[in-house]
Amino acid sequence: MKTGAANKKLEKVIALVEKKGIEAKGLIEELKELREFALKEQDPLLAKVTRLSYEYLTEKKAYDVQAQWEEDEEGGEFPLEIDDKDNLLYLLNLMVKADHKINREEIKDYRTALKEELY
């Protein structure tokens, strides 16, 4: 996120998830507000992944999105086992420096995984 206000909101959401987890009261509303910042900053990737995230949380009551993979010595990929809270926190922390090339690629992975799960 680029603006100070957007980063402040993102930090608030991160703190909420760290303290209360994905079942935190008001988390969906906080993510909706965070999406508004992404729209104002004209960042369609962050707006989309934020919307898909709160839709996923609303529908599944979980955040078991399979967006992180690890490669073994033979080049085969396998999914990382991550709990819901850490999974969402990882995405939110990627969004802190969303303009970084590698972070953007990982955010795109989340977007793709969320779309596949929801639609």
Image: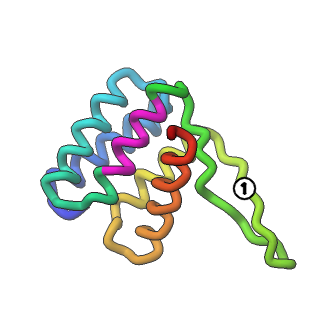
Q: In this view, does 25 lie to the left or right of 105?
A: left
* Residue 44, position as x, y percentages in the image: 27, 58
Residues 102 and 5: in front is: 102
Coloration of the structure image: rainbow
* Location of residue 54 (image quadrant): top left
The residue that appears at 49% across and 31% down in the rendered structure is 22
50 versus 72 height, above or below: above
Q: Is residue 96 above or below residue 56?
A: below
Q: From the image, tell me which residue sits under label 1.
A: 79
Q: Is mark 1 on a helix, strand or loop?
A: strand
Total labels: the figure holds 1
Which of the 4 image quadrants contains residue 62? top right
Q: Nearer the viewer, residue 17 or 41?
A: 41
In this view, the residue farthest toward the top is 25
State whether the magenta stretch is mostly helix, strand or loop: helix
The amino acid type of the residue labelled 1 equals Pro
Q: Tell me if 116 is positioned left or right of 25 in this view.
A: right
Task: List x then y, in percent, for residue 20.
Answer: 46, 28
Report x, y in % for residue 46: 32, 55
- Whole-percent x and y of residue 53? 43, 41
For label 1, the crowd category at 10 Å Cα-Cα, with few meaning under 14, some 14 to 19 and many 20 or more, is few
Give above or below for 97 relative to 112. Answer: below
Name the residue: 28% across, 34% down. 30
Image: 86 above or below 102: above
Specify start and end residues of the magenta stretch as a single range. 48-57
* Residue 93 horizontal side relative to residue 36, left or right: right
